[in-house]
Structures are given as structure tokens and as C-alpha cells.
Amino acid sequence: MKYKVLITDTCLTLIGKISDKKIRRTILNRIEGLSDEPDKQGKMLVKDLSGFRSLHAAGRYRVIYKIDKQTVIVYILAAGIRKQGDKKDIYEIAKKLLTAGLLDTDRTNIR
């Protein structure tokens, strides 16, 4: 069963800022791959990001997404390290975006 994949404007903007075309293409391919069994890809996040999933896209890039019925909504692309407690930790960045309302589907344009 295929899922519909939607990408927020925030995520598209972040992808567009990546200068390396090969990395950008790899990320887009990974996002496109979420149309097949997205629940078996990535990992479930916890605490403040409960309900979201994280998928390793390329290099230090992670895609933060949520599954809603037959739709996968890709909210953001985060680049950073994974070191708990570090302000550059990709999940800390994602939590800040969630707190700022940038991961809220009611406020974010989806394509």
C-alpha cells in the first residue's frame, strides 16, 4: 500500500538551501521512499517529539516526519550532531521548531 507524502514549506526551504546537489537528491529520494512502509523506516521519537519519527537522510541530515492514516507529512530537515544536551543536537533543534509552532500542521503549508 502506497502512502501519500506531503512536505511542508519549511522542509522544502531547508532542502533548497543545501548546495550539494548529490546530497539534496539523496534526501529527496529518501523522502520519496517514505511512500512505502514509512512505519518501518526511521525511528520513533520520544518525550517532546512523541508522535514524530526520524529518518537518516544523508550524512548528518535527518528528516522529521509523522504518519497520519495514509499520509506521511515531512515537517523538517535537520542537520546536526546527535549528542544529547548539546545545543546543536538535531532533536533539540526539532523541539525548538515544535515549540515555535513550525511543526504544527495548522500553521504550516503542506505540498
Image: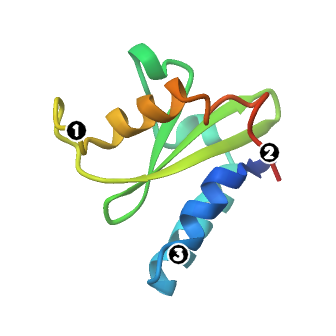
Instruction: Please state the total of marks drawn on the protein image.
Output: 3
**Which numbered disc, 2 or 3, marks the residue closer to the eye?**
2
Q: Which is more N-terminal, label 1 or label 2?
A: 1
Colour logic: rainbow
- Taking the image as shown, residue 110 lies to the left or right of residue 11, namely right
Residue 36 picture location, percent across and down: 69, 49
Q: Residue at x 81, y 43 (%)?
A: 1
Disc 3/disc 1 C-alpha distance (Å): 24 Å
Q: Which is more N-terminal, label 3 or label 2?
A: 3
Q: Residue at x 49, y 18 (%)?
A: 50
Which residue is disc 1 drawn over? 87
Q: Quadrant of residue 100?
A: top right
SS class, disc 2: loop
The amino acid pointed to by label 1 is Lys
Q: Which is more N-terminal, label 1 or label 3?
A: 3
Disc 2/disc 1 C-alpha distance (Å): 27 Å
The amino acid pointed to by label 3 is Arg
Q: Quadrant of residue 61?
A: bottom left
Disc 2/disc 3 C-alpha distance (Å): 21 Å
